[in-house]
Amino acid sequence: MPETQHPEDDGVQIDLISADRINGLRTMEKVRLILDSVHDGNIVILEQGLDPSEESKLIEVTMSEISPDGFTGIEIETYPTDTAAPDPGLLGKLMGNTPKGKLTVIGPANRIETLHKDENLISTLVHEG
Amino acid sequence: MGLLTEIRSSISGLFAGSEPKRIGIYGPPNAGKTTLANRIARDWTGDAVGPESHVPHETRRARRKENVEIKRNGNSVSIDIVDTPGVATKVDYEEFLEHDIEKEDAVRRSREATEGVAEAMHWLREDVEGVIYVLDASTDPFTQVNTMLIGIIESQDLPALILANKTDLEDASVQRVSNAFPQHETIPLSALEGDNMDEVYDKIAEYFG
């Protein structure tokens, strides 16, 4: 991310990315934005998350970048989808009436650990690098 | 089932008997996907699909068993079973060392596992026409991988059958799986013991026939 500065100490950088910033990007641009930051050891918080096809691509690209004694993958947490919400149906989907993504936390698998998750709260422990 | 699925099903019904449907067996590592694939394949073809193991990521390539014909109530359903590697967002070769595997072999397995997960995701986006989603009923189903995969399957509008496997284990809770995905029907089974396979075959015929 071009604007970021890397502090001298061993603190944890957290990138909070707004829905406006992510919405203007194509799938691979979103995946790269996330993974480049995670590769740097940062925690990424997306205001509005990814859609299912983007999540699928994120997993696929993550797998291609795992290496022994290096990057081991990602930890990702999103609030559970509201399963009680009515299905928008085909017409609804055609009209763009798809469920909005929810806040998503993504970090390097070796640095972030989920302590608790429910429909209202994601609690994570971040290990210093 | 969604509207797109119903339309697909109606269209495919016009050409019934022409092509078997490709049904992907998905789920997290160690849910019993290969045990189920072998159970189905052995019951209807006499052959197995691949080796089973308690070591995670034993299946590191999608394996296909073609033309599995399942007969139910006077009708028959023909499917190609695609047994896929367990999906994860992280793979660390050190996990394999805990199973008494040498480092060189563990590194190779982890590399193959990552390729296998990527392949499984590709199959899901491009090449399967229905999904059997297998969960270990003795573990917590409220994981991010399960949530994401079910979301991806729903977004593709694929017919999906959720199986709560390993009911032979003491800690198994079918209700917990049902509660995690209430929008889907959950069928209990033990693929290892062959328990409740009749209902599984009934549902396969209903969902994918």
Image (spheres, coloured by chain):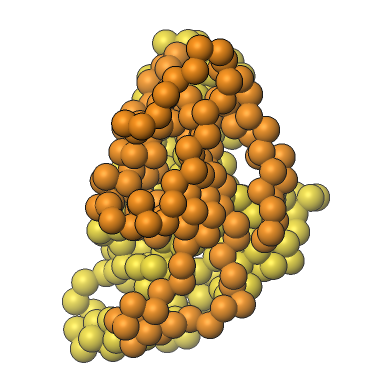
Q: Nearer the viewer, residue B173 or A25?
A: A25
Q: Quadrant of the C terminus of chain B?
A: bottom left
Q: Nearer the viewer, residue A23 or A80?
A: A23
The quarter holding residue B125 reads bottom left
Q: Nearer the viewer, residue A35 or B86?
A: A35
Residue B12 picture location, percent across and down? 24, 82
Would you place residue B105 above or below residue B59 in this image? above
Residue for point 69% across, 59% down: A120
Residue B164 picture location, percent across and down? 63, 60
Would you place residue B141 above or below residue B87 in this image? below
Residue for point 39% across, 68% down: B155
Residue A10 picture location, percent across and down? 57, 15
Would you place residue A30 above or below residue B17 in this image? above
Q: Nearer the viewer, residue A26 or B6?
A: A26
Residue for point 47% across, 85% down: B73
Colour assignment, chain B: yellow
Is residue B79 visible from the viewing direction of this image? no
From the viewer's perspective, tell me whether residue A61 is left or right of residue A13.
Answer: left
Q: Quadrant of the N terminus of chain B?
A: bottom left
Q: Which chain is orange?
A: A
